[in-house]
Image (spheres, rainbow, N blue to C red):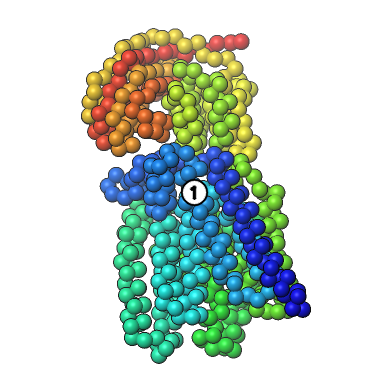
Amino acid sequence: MNTLNSNESKIYPVFTWVLFGLLITYLLLRAYFLEPLHDEAATFFYYIESGLFWGPDVMLDANNHWLNSILGHWMYLIFGDQFFFVRLPNVFAFILFFWGIYRLIKPIQSDLNKMLILLGTTCIPFILDYFSYTRGYGLSMGLFIFSLSYVRDFVVHLHLRSAFWASFFMGLSVYANLNFILSLILMGLLFVLMQLLHKKELSIKQHLLLVSNYILLALAMLPNIFYGLQLKESGALYYGSLDGFWEVTGKTLSRYVIFYDADWLKYASLALIAVLIFYFVRRWKSLGGIKFFRKSSTLMAWFLFGNCAAILLMAKLMDVNYPEDRVGMYLVTLFLLMMGFVLNEIKAMNWMLVGMLFFPIVMIPKTNLSTSIFSPDDRMAQTFFDEVQKHVDSYSTISIYPMQQLTWAHHSRSVDSNNYVIVGREFNKVTDIAIHKTPLLEGIENLDEYDVIAHTPESTHIAYKRKSPYQKKVIYELPLNISETQKEFVSLVSFIIPDSLRNRKLQFHIHGDVEAENKFREFAIMTYSTFDENDQVVNHSYTNERWYHGKKKEFLLNFNYAVERLEPNEHEIRTYIWNRKHEKIGLKNGVFQILELIETKD
């Protein structure tokens, strides 16, 4: 028996390092090979590249996970706009996540049980994906779990150093993801409870140090609270809904974690919760308060049930949306850790820990370097972009679905000439090339008039090109040169629409060489707008040239905008560059053209 235990003690460390090595290598490969998701591109353009995290110019959006934005910006300043490097803070956060779980399960005596729990909690494909993205979720998960390992150390041993480290990592997790402020509050309440239970064992100095820790932690959270209120007031906390805890949180987590979300799971979950509550109440009565809270299963239950109760209260009392999918994925890790500890405590049920193998088994066929569990349709493949580019010339008009715009823009940095893209949810039948998603094209007529020039089934992205291209006839041309200016609105061409342009398919074309100061990485928003006779906007289309050109100070502006016809209420057309930061900007060797689009037949 001693020999067996000796062998187990040798196997577990080797197993742990091999598992960690395989997972961190996989994440590094995903961070390198995966094209960016739409949300990653948004984070990069709005915060990482711009360096705008707060202040009057910042875009109020929940995508701005402060710690992720700041670390990503530092990586960008060192390595440029390569997504592999801006993703590294989240990859490295997996180190904290993995070894945080390792520290949490260390007291378990059975090496086999520890291996099963470690496999089950670190090999969930849905959660693992987020450690290879430049988002706040992987970063916050790593910090949160590592913090919990120190929370447990304080509860068990009353080491103040553990309380301080727990507070430090938990505080950072809030800066990485505002959702963890609930866990920080729960941690504070647990620490206060431990003070009360051990008030005689702790010295006055220790009590004062803990109170000082609470005060410092509260002060450190003020920026997060202020920013969270700003987001709520601006309507930026739109993700999720108030349709119900199971319908929003439980169902989406089930769908992406176990790939099954039947309604009966709701009632099974309620039954399991009832059993667990009964179990913990009995444990409390049998062990007493101090011993009860020293159990790791109790700690996980405190944070799991505490978060769930807070989520329900905030939804009912403050109309805060229930967290959906990735926003609530930390609940999955808490649940699995809690169940792992509970099953380890009940010797007759140790065998049920084999269920943890579900996740590594499922992970095997899900392992890839090209797609993701959540939102695979929000990523544009480089091969898809390259195929479309083969059909693009300087006069090509391109339309694109909104969720494809930012990833298209990032890919466009690899080519010298970038055409303006018209963004819209409807399939645009007047442009030369239309990029969309296959599930959204059901019922669209006359698709047989187009050739498919690129298609990625994994993301459902598809690009069409007209079989019979328009004959493009120039009906008006104007040289265009703009001396260096710092105006906020740099007018290119503006004119009252003459009757001669009505009831005709038209393309407006502008090209020229732009020279821009590009100091603040927030410049040159190319805009096409039409106005009615009362100077009210009828149509407004724009794109930020920085998305396409990055830090370049000289680039080619290539604007193409096609219309089926000008609407009767459209009275004036204005094309201009919105120069938000009043930077120096000019255009030379330019031309403005109006082309008539004439139908042709094969």
- Position of 77 with respect to 21 (left or right) is left
Q: Quadrant of the C terminus?
A: top right
Foreground residue among 70 and 298: 70
For label 1, the residue is 88
Q: Residue 584 placed where, x, y %?
A: 25, 28
Q: Residue 21 placed where, x, y %?
A: 62, 55
Q: Is 550 above or below relative to 453? A: below
- Residue drawn where x is 24% and y is 20% of the image: 483
Q: Is 481 above or below relative to 382? A: above
Foreground residue among 510 and 146: 146
- Position of 365 with respect to 288 (left or right) is right
Q: Residue 276 placed where, x, y %?
A: 61, 76
Callout 1 amino acid: Leu
Q: Residue 54 placed where, x, y %?
A: 31, 50
SS label for mark 1: helix
Indicate the quadrant where residue 571 lies.
top left
- Residue drawn where x is 69% and y is 54% of the image: 362
Q: Is 114 above or below relative to 241? A: below
**Figure label count:** 1
- Residue drawn where x is 70% and y is 49% of the image: 365
Indicate the quadrant where residue 534 lies.
top left
